[in-house]
Image (spheres, rainbow, N blue to C red):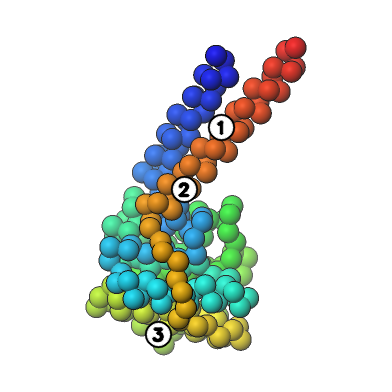
């Protein structure tokens, strides 16, 4: 019974932590833990979704690790709407949110411009590379297209060619976030079980 109680408590704690994380954070910081591209699938047309996904996948496959967050509206920022219209600050914030799991290049694309951050690296060269590129602010499709162009430019500056076609795996934001939450729950439950066994052996 004690083991069951411990497992139940751990499950409730994990679910509470997941809820708090979503309330206090932003969707991209959850999604980019497991995926390389974040966008709202209800905003970005499917054709642009596939093109951007293919470009990021190609860049990573060819030795240019990068993750991309396309932020069309302040809704996409969740609880950090104060960073709306501030892509550079948001890129730094999001990179810090991900730093425990991912320490590579991070590109943020908003209608107001681009943000870039790569921990322990200078960002000046990346911003110089993107200086003449304007973020598409007219439509979500245009914004996604400018994200593709930004990835291509950044990769090309490092000598990497990026393809924008190819089979793209189906994605669903809510499903992927659920996988992340379930993964956290499993880890917490395993930790609780190990602690219980250790205590039981120690008391025996």
**Where does label 1 land, which residue?**
189
Q: CA distance from mark 2 to mark 1?
A: 15 Å
In the image, residue 148 lies at what x, y percent?
Answer: 42, 79
* 147 to 95, vertically: above or below: below
Q: Which residue is mark 2?
A: 179
Q: Earlier in the sequence, mark 2 or mark 3?
A: 3
* Mark found first going from the N terminus, 2 or 1: 2
**Seen in the image, is 139 located left or right of residue 8?**
left
The residue pinned by badge 3 equals 133
Q: Quadrant of the C terminus?
A: top right
Please give the count of numbered marks on the rendered protein: 3
Q: Are marks 2 and 3 in contact (CB under 8 Å)?
A: no
Which residue is rendered at x = 50% and y = 83% of the image? 163
Q: Are marks 2 and 1 in contact (CB under 8 Å)?
A: no
Q: Within the image, what quadrant is residue 168 found in?
A: bottom left
The answer to which of 137 and 176 lies nearer the viewer is 176
Which numbered disc flags the more N-terminal residue, 3 or 1? 3
């Amino acid at each position: 019974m004690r083991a069951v109680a411990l497992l139940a408590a751990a499950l409730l704690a994990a679910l509470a932590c997941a809820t708090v994380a979503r309330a206090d954070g932003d969707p991209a910081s959850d999604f980019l833990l497991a995926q390389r591209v974040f966008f709202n699938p209800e905003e970005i047309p499917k054709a642009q979704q596939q093109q951007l996904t293919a470009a990021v996948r190609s860049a990573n496959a060819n030795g240019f690790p990068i993750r991309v967050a396309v932020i069309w509206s302040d809704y996409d920022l969740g609880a950090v709407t104060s960073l709306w219209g501030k892509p550079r600050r948001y890129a730094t914030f999001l990179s810090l949110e991900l730093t425990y799991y991912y320490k590579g290049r991070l590109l943020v694309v908003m209608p107001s411009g681009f943000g870039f951050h790569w921990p322990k690296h200078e960002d000046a060269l990346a911003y110089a590379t993107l200086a003449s590129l304007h973020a598409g602010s007219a439509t979500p499709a245009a914004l996604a297209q400018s994200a593709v162009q930004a990835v291509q430019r950044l990769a090309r500056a490092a000598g990497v060619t990026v393809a924008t076609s190819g089979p793209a795996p189906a994605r669903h934001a809510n499903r992927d976030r659920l996988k992340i939450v379930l993964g956290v729950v499993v880890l917490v439950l395993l930790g609780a079980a190990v602690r219980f066994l250790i205590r039981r052996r120690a008391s025996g």
